[in-house]
Image (cartoon, rainbow, N blue to C red):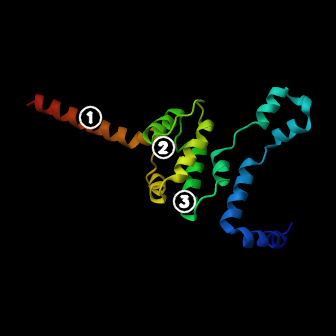
Amino acid sequence: MTQTNLEAALQPLVLEHGFEQVHKQLHAMEISEPNPRQLLLAADPGAKSSRARKSIRKSRPTAPQYVAKMELPFEKDSPVTELAERFHKKSFLPSFSDIAHFCQLYSIDVPASRTRASAIPRVFKFIAEMEADDIQRIVDEGMYSGPSRLGPIADAIRRNGRASSAAVSSSSNV
């Protein structure tokens, strides 16, 4: 399909649903598109055990897919989508313990299943109900990003420790 034909096909959809919704749905489709291995397994039922096929069919939606299906006000759409992307990349609530801490902090029931995927509905329903400014603050400040963001703090503690030990050793030499 040429660029002109593609644009002509998309234009009525954009006019009916709006650019943001079409863009959001296209993004969700891109993420959920099966990889070539999954297509081969679906085409050849004998390729893997029935248990493996069931796990492919019953897979939970990713955070971006889950958020793409939510109806969010315009001002919340972008930051919630950004948090979903970060969740998917494990730069927002990277471990289940981070999710449990987040749930405890906001009085959300911690999911019984201790997987990140099981927490997606609870976490993102709660986030969608938050004020738009609070959601944007989480995005802007990189809150709940896990221990990987503690590097600069650890460096500062080391520098301070070296400076303190140097001061103690120089005062004892006097």
Q: Residues within 10 Å of mark 2 (few under 14, many from 20)?
A: many
**Residue at coordinates 71% horizontally, 49% vertically from top-left?**
31
Q: For residue 23, which quarter of the picture?
A: bottom right
**Residue at coordinates 57% horizontally, 45% vertically from top-left?**
87
Quarter of the image with the N terminus in it? bottom right
Mark 2 and mark 1 lie on one chain; the one further toward the N terminus is 2
The image shows residue 117 at horizontal and vertical percentages of: 63, 38
In the image, which disc is placed on residue 140?
none
Q: Residues within 10 Å of mark 3 (few under 14, many from 20)?
A: many
Q: Which SS class for mark 3?
A: helix
**Tag 1: residue type?**
Gly
Please tell me which residue lies in front, 37 or 43.
Answer: 43
In the image, which disc is placed on residue 76?
3
**Tag 3: residue type?**
Lys
Nearer to us of marks 2 and 1 is 2
Which residue bears the numbered disc 2?
145
The reply, left or right, for residue 21 in relation to residue 149 is right
Which residue bears the numbered disc 1?
161
Quarter of the image with the C terminus in it? top left
Mark 2 and mark 3 lie on one chain; the one further toward the N terminus is 3
The image shows residue 164 at horizontal and vertical percentages of: 21, 35
The image shows residue 9 at horizontal and vertical percentages of: 82, 69
The reply, left or right, for residue 26 in relation to residue 129 is right
